[in-house]
Image (spheres, rainbow, N blue to C red):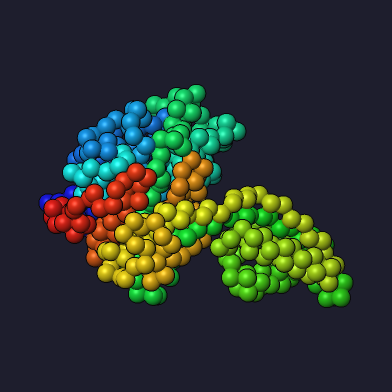
Amino acid sequence: MTGIGTAEWVMARCDDLTRHSSRFDALERVYLSPEHAAANMAVRTWMLDAGLDTETDAAGNIWGRRAADGRPQRPGTEGEPALVLGSHLDTVPDAGRYDGMLGVVLAIAVAHRLRDVTLPFALEVVGFSDEEGTRFGKALLGSCAASGQWDPAWWDQADADGVTLREAFARFGLAPERVGDAARRPEDLVGYLEAHIEQGPVLESENLPLGYVTSIAGARRFVLTITGEARHAGGTPFARRRDALVAAAHLVTRIEELAKAADCLATVGDLHVQPGAVNVIPGRAELTLDLRGRTDAGRDALWDQIAAAGQRIAAARGVTFEVSETHRAPSTTCADRMTAAVAAGIAEATGTPSDTGAAGAAAPSDTVRGLWSPAGHDGMAMDAVTDVGMLFLRCRDGISHHPDEHVETADVGVALDAYTAAVLALARAHPGVEPAPLAESVETLGEKAR
Ligand SMILES: [Zn+2]
């Protein structure tokens, strides 16, 4: 078998994890399921092989840890503050095999490569238990627990079978009243560094294997309701109609125009028409709207334009327009020192000239691609307790949340080098560390892994 620190090992472990699925015909692994427990067990074994001691926390997240000097160390024990690497192990229904899992397995491989290297901080790897929110409709449950943001209001949320989150905890062998034990303290953390597939086409279109993330967009979500009048489709001339669906159709195309002009993303993902009969003019149309932007200010300005457009279209067509906001999350800006380290790691791994300097503490290189993430990630929750950075890998055709999700082994190899180099850049830039205490280069570490 190929060695634990290699790209081939990472790809094979992502394949292994597809076994832990609730469906025979597809990959689906949700929070607090038997598959979740099985995936945690598999990951635990690999963590032990990589020289980490392990622990499942009070919210079902799996953690591995080594001390600064490289000794395996129980997560949650007293010790040096830790740099946390990782991602999530849960999936959407009919998922691909890389979204989340790749980041966990890469982190384990990086820990293995660095097992003989003394660092100025402890190193931890986490496999978060719930990022997608597939089972209970609330995303980031695992990382919200780890960042001390658990909301007791979530306990009574139920899955499709009516099992509440509280009941699911008990069935998984977790004690709901102890969920607070999963919370990490800011003083125990150095930062959170995650590798993830891009889930978009930017890197592929620019022929780049890797990029660093500048910010993670926070979405705003709305239900837009247009109310007109349901009437006979045969007996009502156009001049007398107050057609809610035609107004909605105009609004949907206007939303796309406005979002493109604002360089934001806007999606009407659901449209429900009443009464919904072939011979009745629609009296009511309900639309969902999801808005994402590089910055919260840009996203909010777009929303103001959409709301004004909705009012104008409604007035012109004799219908009413009402809005209700159902979700609002702030965007997360990756910390300068984390993006600088990731950019330095990419520059080293890809041979790109870097202006970040040896300490990795300057601004990110403008020769390495930075991009914002329209998709949400665990870093949005972890940002509450520590600095966040992310490394993106090119994925084929930008496809994600789909079984065709794919990354190239060669890109995973470059990502391993870049991820390892980013950890070393953070180590060099760590307060109190003299320049260049880390003799081994990333290439040497990679060779040793093979
Ligand atoms: Zn993900």
Picture quadrant where residue 262 is located: bottom right
Residue at 63% of width from left, 74% of height from top?
Answer: 261
Count of numbered circles in the view = 0
Q: Quick check: 144 left or right of 279?
A: left
* Percent of width and height locating residue 88: 39, 46
Q: Is residue 312 above or below residue 141?
A: below
* Percent of width and height locating residue 98: 34, 55
* Percent of width and height locating residue 297: 64, 60
Residue at 58% of width from left, 70% of height from top?
Answer: 263
* Percent of width and height locating residue 381: 50, 44
Q: Is residue 436 visible?
A: yes
Q: Quick check: 236 left or right of 74?
A: right
Q: Is residue 436 above or below residue 394?
A: above
Position of the C terminus, as image quadrant, is bottom left
Picture quadrant where residue 235 is located: bottom right
Picture quadrant where residue 56 is located: top left
Foreground: 208 or 71?
71
Residue at 57% of width from left, 31% of height from top?
Answer: 152
Foreground: 335 or 95?
335
Residue at 46% of width from left, 56% of height from top?
Answer: 336
Q: Is residue 58 above or below residue 232?
A: above
